[in-house]
Image: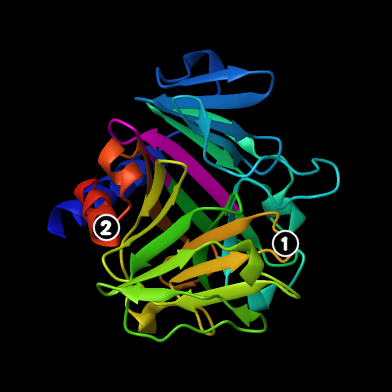
């Protein structure tokens, strides 16, 4: 536990230090793990390749391992924003639906400093929030993303960072079960199992009907994982107790679309009281791996959990 949290804390401190200086606007000086083509950024670490679209909220639009796509593809670029990975503010009750376009779909400004690339939104006039996303290498097949939420409103805000990743309607999600029972809000509950103190959700199209399905629950150990077609995506973050999470929310959430378009894997950090001009920081480390052949042939839950934990 100490080693994992130390890595996340160190990455956050590095970003905080970098942010004190003037942004480097010379994009010819992109770091070695990053290149820019036709308005997109491509980050590579080991066999992991991440595609980012600065003009669409700096969102992650593709995530591949040796050419295999992990994320759900863009459904309808002009009419639909439910694709890729985005940052939201929590609790969602503050802004309801749809997401705030300035933060969720409008262009972000790109800046470069050392081996880090940062994408920063404009200020949303309604909430006063401004988001930034800093991407940096974190080891083989790993990329770290440090999110910042700035409060530019005239009032104190209680806000938490929430990362939303859209995945194909297939596969399995799992995470260590925390201290709260699962809830589903206004949606149908997902059919999940508890195995070895982990919550498991196996996607079954026949069980997703009539309306969207959802589960919200506290986690433990600071990770949530997704496996599909022999590949694993795991998100690593600092674990927080239920008391630190925004009111009405939970640390981990899984959402299944009624039309079988995608699954959402969500996790969020602690709620922070921000005075005017203050900001919070939260780091998520993305791990992507191809499963060993024996786990592909026999995806036994205990062995899958051990493999996921071995990456931390």
Element on which disc 2 rests: helix
- In x, y percent, where is residue 140? 29, 30
Our reading of the magenta stretch's main secondary structure is strand
Q: Quadrant of residue 92?
A: bottom right
Residue at the far front in the pictured view = 297
Of badges 1 and 2, the one in the foreground is 2
On the question of residue 34 being in view, the answer is: yes
Q: Is residue 144 magenta?
A: yes
Q: Earlier in the sequence, mark 1 or mark 2?
A: 1
Residue span colored magenta = 131-145
Q: Residue furthest right?
A: 79
Query: Residue at the spot x=77%, y=65% of the render?
Result: 98
Image point (60%, 58%), residue name? 263
Q: Position of residue 32 (x, y in %)?
A: 40, 17
Scheme of image coloration: rainbow
Vertical comparison of 226 with 109: above or below: below
């Amino acid at each position: 536990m100490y080693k994992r949290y130390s890595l996340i804390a160190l990455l956050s401190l590095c970003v905080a230090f970098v942010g004190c200086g003037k942004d480097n606007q010379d994009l010819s000086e992109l770091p070695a793990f990053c290149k820019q083509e036709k308005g997109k950024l491509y980050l590579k670490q080991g066999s992991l390749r991440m595609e980012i679209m600065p003009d669409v909220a700096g969102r992650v639009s593709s995530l591949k391992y040796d050419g295999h796509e992990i994320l759900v593809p863009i459904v309808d670029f002009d009419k639909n924003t439910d694709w890729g990975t985005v940052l939201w503010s929590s609790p969602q009750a503050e802004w309801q639906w749809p997401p705030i376009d300035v933060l969720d779909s409008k262009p972000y400004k790109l800046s470069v400093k050392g081996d880090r690339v940062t994408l920063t939104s404009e200020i949303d006039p309604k909430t006063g929030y401004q988001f930034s996303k800093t991407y940096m290498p974190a080891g083989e097949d790993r990329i770290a993303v440090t999110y910042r939420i700035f409060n530019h409103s005239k009032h104190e805000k209680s806000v938490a960072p929430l990362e939303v990743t859209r995945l194909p309607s297939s596969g399995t999600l799992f995470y260590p079960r925390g201290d709260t029972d699962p809830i589903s809000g206004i949606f149908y509950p997902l059919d999940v199992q508890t195995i070895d103190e982990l919550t498991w959700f196996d996607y079954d199209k026949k069980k997703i009907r009539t309306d969207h399905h959802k589960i919200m629950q506290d986690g433990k150990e600071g990770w949530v994982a997704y496996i599909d077609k022999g590949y694993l995506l795991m998100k690593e973050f600092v674990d927080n107790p239920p008391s630190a999470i925004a009111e009405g929310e939970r640390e981990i959430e899984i959402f299944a679309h009624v039309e079988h378009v995608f699954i959402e894997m969500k996790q969020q950090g602690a709620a922070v009281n921000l005075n005017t001009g203050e900001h919070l920081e939260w780091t998520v480390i993305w791990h992507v791996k191809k499963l060993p052949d024996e786990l592909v042939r026999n995806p036994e839950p205990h062995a899958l959990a051990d493999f996921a934990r071995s990456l931390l």
